[in-house]
Image: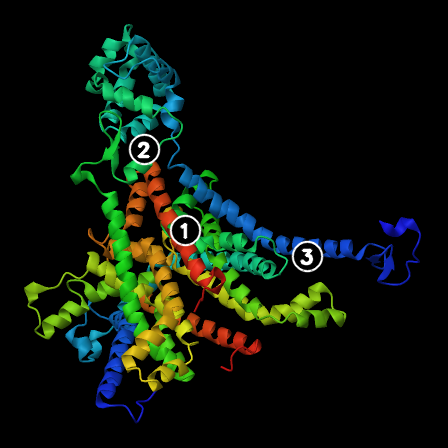
Amino acid sequence: MTQSDGTHSGSDAGHMVNGQMVTVDGTPLKASLKRAERKRTFIAFLLVAPLLTYLLISFIFPIGQMMWRSVDNPQVVTTLPKTLEALEDWDGEGLPDEPVFEALAEELAIASANRTVGQLAVRLNYEISAARGALMRTSRSVEDFEPPYKEDFLDAHRLWNDPAFYRIIKREGNPLTASYYIAAFDGTYNEDGEVVLQDENRRIYIDLFIRTFAMSLGITLITLLLGFPISFLMASLPMRHANLLMIFVLLPFWTSLLVRTTSWIVLLQQQGVINELLIALGFIGDDGRLGMIYNMTGTIIAMTHILLPFMVLPLYSVMKTIPPSYVRAAKSLGATPWTAFWRVYVPQTLPGIGAGAVLVFIISIGYYITPALVGGQSGQMISNLIAHHMQTSLNWGLAAALGSVLLISVLILYWVYNRLVGADSLKLG
Amino acid sequence: MAVPTYAGPLERIWYYAFRVLCGLIFFFLIAPILIMVPLSFNVEPYFTYTREMLTFNPDGFSLRWYQDLFSSESWMTSIQNSLIIGIASTLIATFLGTLAALGLSRSEMPFKGLVMGLLISPMIVPLIISAAGMFFFYSSVGLANTLPGVILAHAALGTPFVVITVTATLVGFDHSLTRASASLGAGAGRTFFKIQMPLILPGVISGGLFAFITSFDEIVIVLFLAGVEQRTIPREMWSGIREQISPTILAVASILVAFSILLLTTVEVLRRRSERLRGMSPG
C-alpha cells in the first residue's frame, strides 16, 4: 500500500499521491472502491446462496440423477463381467463356445446367491421378453450344471439356443445404453442389431407425443379464442368494472385444481348436470346420454377451464397498456372497424398473445392430474405414461428417457418464452 | 365503453353480441365452480340436482355430507396434514425466497440471469418430472414417506413464487430511502427492518400465500413421496374421485372454494396496498 512511502500526511480525505487518488487510510481510491464493490457482490451472493444451495441439493440434483437413469446401464456389466470378456471372442454368428458358458455358469451362480440376478433378468427382459424366464429358471439350477456347461444351458431354456440373446447381452454389456431412448421413440433392434421402428401395432410413444402436443396446441388455441374477447372487454372498461370482472378470472385461478376437476366430473358425467339438463329440455333421450368425460373431450374441456386464467392474465396486462388513440386514428383515416382492429390493434397485443400461448402450452404438455382423472383412455398424455412406468411397470429407465424428452421440450419452450417476455415479468395474480 | 352515438345498426348489433359472448365466457369460467356448491347440500348421494332442490324444498337439502366430512377420521387427518405441510413449507420458502430476492435485486449480483433461471426452475419443470426425481432422491436419504420429506419438497416448489413476487416489489423500491436512513445514523439491520421490510412486506406476504396455495393444492409430489400417514386434502380427494366418489368430496370442495375466495381477497388487497405504497397506481 502507499502508506509506507511516507510522502503524504494521511490526515485529509481524497488527496493526490504520486498522481493517484487515495482515501483517508492511504489506499488508492480505485482499489478501495473495488474492494467495496467486491464486498457488495459477496453480500448479494450470500443472500442468494442459501436458496440456491437448497434447490441445487433438493431439486436440481435429484432431477439430474433421475435423467441419468435414462442412460445408466449397470446391470449386465456388473453381474456378468467375465461372460462379456469371453463374448469378445465370439463373432456374433451361431452359438458362442464353451468359455462363455463356463463364465455364465460361474457368474449366474454368484448372482443367484447374492440376489442380483433379478435385476439382471428385469433389465434383459426389456430387450427380449423371454429373458426373465430364462435367467430365473437357469439361475435356480445353475449350481447343478456340470462341464461342459453349454449343453446344460441349451437344455435349461430355449432362449439359450437363440444367438440373438447373446448379441443382446453383448450389446447391453456397456455401462451406458441408448436403448431406453430408442424405446421412447418406438424404436427397437432388429435381427442384425440395427435400430428400426417397432411394428405398427406396438408403437405407443410417438403417437402419444404427437397427441400430447396436438392436445396442448388445441387447448392453447381454445384458451386464446376464449381469452382474447374477455381480456379485450376488461381492458376497454373502466378500472372499477374491470376489477370486478377480474374476479371471474381470479377465482378459478385460486381454486384448487382438484376442486375444478371434480366440478367438471359433476357437470359432464353420464348422470351429471349437463346430461340431466339436456334430457329435461328434451334435446336427447335417456338412452342418448353424451359421453363427455373419461375421454379426450373431457380432458380438453377441463384443461381449457383450468388454464384459461393463464392466458387472460398476460393478455389483459398487455392490452391495458395499449392506448386507444391508435385505433381511433386508424378509423379517422378511413379504416373500417375490422381493418382498424386487425391491422392496428391485434399486432400490438402480440406480446401478450405470445406470452399467454407459450405459458399455457408449457403447462399443458406436462399436465398429469386432470388427464389421469378425467382422461379415460383417449385423453391420456405423456405424463400419465411416465407415471405408469414410474409406479406400475417400474421401468425407471424408460420413465427417465420419456421424462428427459418432455423436460427438454419444456426447457426449449421456456427459453422461447423468456426471449418473448423475460422471466422476471411473469405475472402472478 | 358505451355504444358511440355515431355507431350504425351493424355496430350496435356487434356491440351487444360481443357483450353476450363475453358473458358466456365468464359464465364458463365461474359456473363450474359455483354449480357444485349447492350440490354439496344434496340429501341424496347423487351428483345432480333433484326435483326437491330445484323447487327449494327444504327436504331436498341437508348437511349430511358436511357431517360425514367432520366425523371422518381420514379427512380430519388429511386436513391436519395439509395445514402442517402448507404452513411449514411456506415458512421455509418465504424465508429463503425473500433472502434470495433481496440478493437478486442488488445490481452487484453476478450471473443474475443464470441464477434466476435456476431459482424459478421448480415452477417450470413439469411436476411429474420433479416428483419422479425427488422420489428417488428422498428415498435414498430416507425422507420418503415422512412429513419432513413432503415439507422440504413443497418448500422447493413454493420458492419461485416468493422470489418472483418479492423481486417485483423490489423493482419499484426507491433506494434513496435506505440511503436517507443510513445518513440519519441507522445501521444496516435497523434500516432493513424499519424501512425496507415494511415496504416489501406486501410482496413477501403474497409470495407466501402463493407458496402456501402451491403446497396446499399440490398432489403429484404427494402421490409419489407421501405414505398413508401423510395424506393431504388433495390426496384424499384424488382417491375419493378415483375410488368411491361420494358427495363428501363436494362438501370439501365447497369449503375449499370459500377458502380460495378468502385467499384471493387477501392477495388483491395486498397487491393494491403495495402498489399504492410505491405510488405506482392510484387504485
Q: What's the distance in space between the residues labelled 1 and 2, CA to CA?
A: 23 Å
Q: Residues within 10 Å of mark 1 (few under 14, many from 20)?
A: some
In percent of width and height, residue A397 lies at 35, 37
Q: How many marks?
A: 3
Tag shown at residue A40 = 3
Which residue corresponds to mark 2? A179
Residue at horizontal 43%, vertical 45%? B134
Residue A261 appears in the rendering: no
Image quadrant occupied by the C terminus of chain A: bottom left
Chain ID of residue with mark 1: A
In percent of width and height, residue A129 lies at 23, 29
The answer to which image quadrant residue A395 occupies is top left
Q: Residues within 10 Å of mark 2 (few under 14, many from 20)?
A: many
Which residue corresponds to mark 1? A411
Q: Earlier in the sequence, mark 3 or mark 1?
A: 3
Given the image, on which type of amino acid does mark 3 rest?
Arg
Q: Earlier in the sequence, mark 3 or mark 2?
A: 3
Q: Is A127 or B143 nearer to us in this picture?
A: A127
In percent of width and height, residue A339 lies at 29, 78
Residue at horizontal 7%, vertical 73%? A282
